[in-house]
Amino acid sequence: MLCYNLTKIDPMLVVVFTNTASITMLVNVKTLTGRIMQFDVAPTDLVKELLHHIVERTGIDPVQLRIIHKGSMVSPMNTIEKSNINAGDTVHIVLSLRGG
């Protein structure tokens, strides 16, 4: 503390900046055939972005693709964090079949 010419009675404010966009986690995705793929996502990413990565790897039509996590369908407009998807969790992809 002496190199900054501070005394013990001087108040000091320390501000630490972190870039939350660089914090990523691995999420497992189980495909229709049972294959498990891993994707590196940030908690602040939208589920829609995860869907985009899945479409790039699998080639499945994004309109038909749905993500299921812990038995519930996940909204594409929510963030990964808001959808309670944590590091190491497995989400399942299913096809939405239209009836007629």
Image: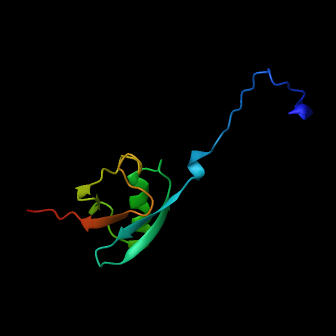
Seen in the image, is 45 located left or right of residue 9?
left
Q: Residue furthest front?
A: 8
Q: Residue furthest left?
A: 100
Q: Position of residue 100 (x, y in %)?
A: 8, 62
The front one of 7 and 47 is: 7
The front one of 11 and 27 is: 11
Q: Quadrant of residue 66?
A: bottom left
Q: How is the image coloured?
A: rainbow
Q: What residue is rendered at 31% in x and 78% in y?
A: 34
Q: What quarter of the picture does the N terminus occupy?
A: top right
Please say if 83 is above or below 64: above
Q: What residue is rendered at 34% in x and 71% in y?
A: 30
Q: What residue is rendered at 66% in x and 39% in y?
A: 17
Q: How many circles with numbers are drawn on the protein? A: 0
Seen in the image, is 33 located left or right of residue 59?
left
Q: Position of residue 73 (x, y in %)?
A: 25, 55
Q: Position of residue 61 (x, y in %)?
A: 32, 66
Q: Position of residue 25 (x, y in %)?
A: 50, 59
Seen in the image, is 63 located left or right of residue 6?
left
Q: Quadrant of residue 50?
A: bottom left
Seen in the image, is 95 located left or right of residue 21?
left
Q: Quadrant of residue 91?
A: bottom left
Q: What residue is rendered at 41% in x and 67% in y?
A: 28
Please say if 56 is above or below 48: below
